[in-house]
Amino acid sequence: MSGTTEGGLKAAKTNRKLHGKNFYAEIGRKGGQNGHTGGFASEKIGDDGLTGFERAKIAGAKGGHLSRRGAKK
């Protein structure tokens, strides 16, 4: 039953039973508290001297360069 809607609902019910009714809210809160980097949207200049946008641009170029698609014909 794993990977089905029915299995997911059953797992959610079990999680709430074992860990309390606020289980999903609690893990979401913990995840939100851990994020402090700002990611690619950050305007702050990082240790590498780049803003988030510049870092994203470089990462995208690397990914595009490694693309498995052939050249446009």
Image (spheres, rainbow, N blue to C red):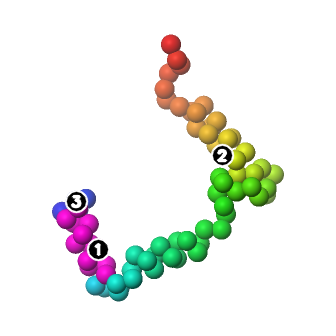
Disc 3 residue crowd, few under 14, some 14–19, many 20+, Cα 10 Å: few
**Which percent across, then down, holds residue 60?**
62, 39
Query: Is residue 46 at least partly visible in the picture?
Result: no
Query: How far is the residue under mark 3 from the one under mark 2?
Result: 35 Å
Pointer 2 residue:
56
Does the segment drawn in magenta span residue 14? yes
**Which percent across, then down, holds residue 54?**
73, 45
Sequence-first tag of 2 and 1: 1
Q: Is residue 2 left or right of residue 68?
A: left
Q: Which residues are magenta?
A: 5-16
> Which kind of residue does numbered mark 2 sit on?
Ala
For the point 39% across and 80% down, which residue is it?
Answer: 23
Query: How far is the residue under mark 2 from the one under mark 1?
Result: 36 Å
Residue at the far right: name it.
49
Pointer 1 residue:
12
Pointer 3 residue:
4
